Image: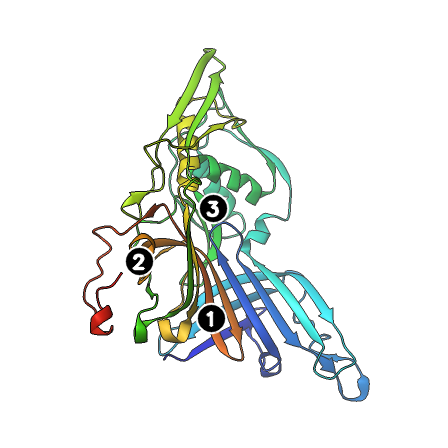
Amino acid sequence: MSEVTYLLQVGGQSAPPELLSAVRMLEIEDHADLADMLRLRVAVAVNDGASGWRLLDDDFFTRLQNIRVSLKVGSAAAEPLIDAYVVDVRASLSEEPGRSVLEVVAMDGTVLLSLEEKVRAWPDQADSAIASAIFSEPGFTPVVEDTSVVRSADDTTTLQRGTDIQFLRRLAERNGYECFVQVGSSGQTEGHFHPPKVEEQPQAILNVNLGSATNVASFNARYDMLGATTASATGVEVESASDQQADVQDGDLKSLGSESTVPADRPRKVLIAGTGLVRSGELETYARSVVDRSSFAVTAEGVVSTAVLGSALHAKRPVLVRGAGEAFSGTYYVERVLHVFTSDGHEQHVKLRRNAAGVTGSDRFEEDDSLPPAEAVRI
């Protein structure tokens, strides 16, 4: 097993020994759809002579104080897990020795995009150009994929009402994109605006019930067979007064299994309204994004020991699962990773999703010398 440690920085400085020794629990939530969050529980106590509270009075966790956490597994280089800003602090003080704690909550760089509500116009710009401009304002590195439509001010002007992150997420939704902020491998905060990266190589292999090679303590899977949909959207193009319609039967994302969750036989269909879009091309893009989102009807949850797996998992990237049977083995997209650090070690609570069931020819479960012979090729 690999040794797992974490590195904690507060305000750009390594946490002092007295703070590290007082940490009772550290959780970091890496999520595909929500802002990444950090939760820290620290033991506090009255100073000698009852002159104040140790750690509680030291102003470690002031408003929007920066906290960074990196994870180190074995001899590998430390990799950043979160670059966050303090948004909530709670003290639970008890007369019983050892029972007083300080709980700290911090949010990733998304919080810097949610501090101010704005009304501003974005004329003659594609949604991707708008995203790049907004991410650049707080100094983030934009990781943005181009969108095809540029709205002319003579026709339609994109208008922002609300915070930057609310606005960006609306733009992402109508393009079928993800929108999130994360710390990159170099430590620089990145702003992402692009389709889900389902085609990347799986970051790890999770072995379910495979004897000595098992690295998932529990695994629960579900296939919601009425969850996925086809979609239809309509609008009226004002200038020509012509009806615009889009009917979409499947999505754009790569199928992660052999059996699509969007059935050709008696599919469930939704009618989309209130999009604010009028052109058929934009309506089709929006409708296809609805189908893509609903197609992730196969979900799974599990608990992974980092010491056994030997690496950290990341949301918004694929992972391969084997040993879960033909329907539930294969490639998944990681929706959520909850890193839990306690005195007992480090666990990763994962939530996965996929837009198909079954395995494909690219999910090659070949013989593996690390597995017992009888289990080497089992899916």
Which residue is situated farthest in the right direction here?
A: 50
Binning the other alpha carbons within 10 Å of mark 1 as few (below 14), some (14 to 19) or many (20 upward) gives many
Q: Position of residue 140 (x, y in %)?
A: 48, 52
Question: Is 332 rendered above or below residue 131?
Answer: below
Q: Residue flagged by tag 3: what amino acid is it?
A: Cys
- Please give left or right for residue 125 compared with residue 112 in the image: left
Query: Which of the 4 image quadrants contains residue 3?
Result: bottom left
Which residue is at a point 29% across and 44% down the rendered structure image?
259
Q: Look at discs 1 and 2 and give the one toward the viewer.
A: 2
Q: How far apart in space, not on screen, are marks 3 and 1 (Cα)? A: 27 Å
User: Does 270 sit above or below residue 44?
Assistant: above
Residue neighbourhood size for the residue with mark 3, other residues' Cα within 10 Å, grouped as few (<14), some (14–19), many (≥20)? many
Which residue lies most toward the bottom here?
Answer: 49
Q: Which residue is mark 3?
A: 179
Under circle 2, the secondary element is helix
In terms of secondary structure, where does tag 1 sit?
A: strand
In the figure, residue 282 lies in which quadrant?
Answer: top left
Report the amino acid beneath label 2.
Gly
Between tags 3 and 1, which lies in front?
A: 1
Residue 23 percent across, percent down from the top left = 60, 77
Quadrant that contains the N terminus: bottom left
- Residue 16 lies in quadrant: bottom right
Quadrant location of the C terminus?
A: bottom left
Q: Is residue 134 visible?
A: yes
Residue 298's disc is: none
Residue bearing mark 2: 325
Q: Between marks 1 and 2, how big is the CA–CA gap?
A: 24 Å
For the residue pair 5 and 371, the one nearer the viewer reads as 371
Mark nearer the N terminus (3 vs 2): 3
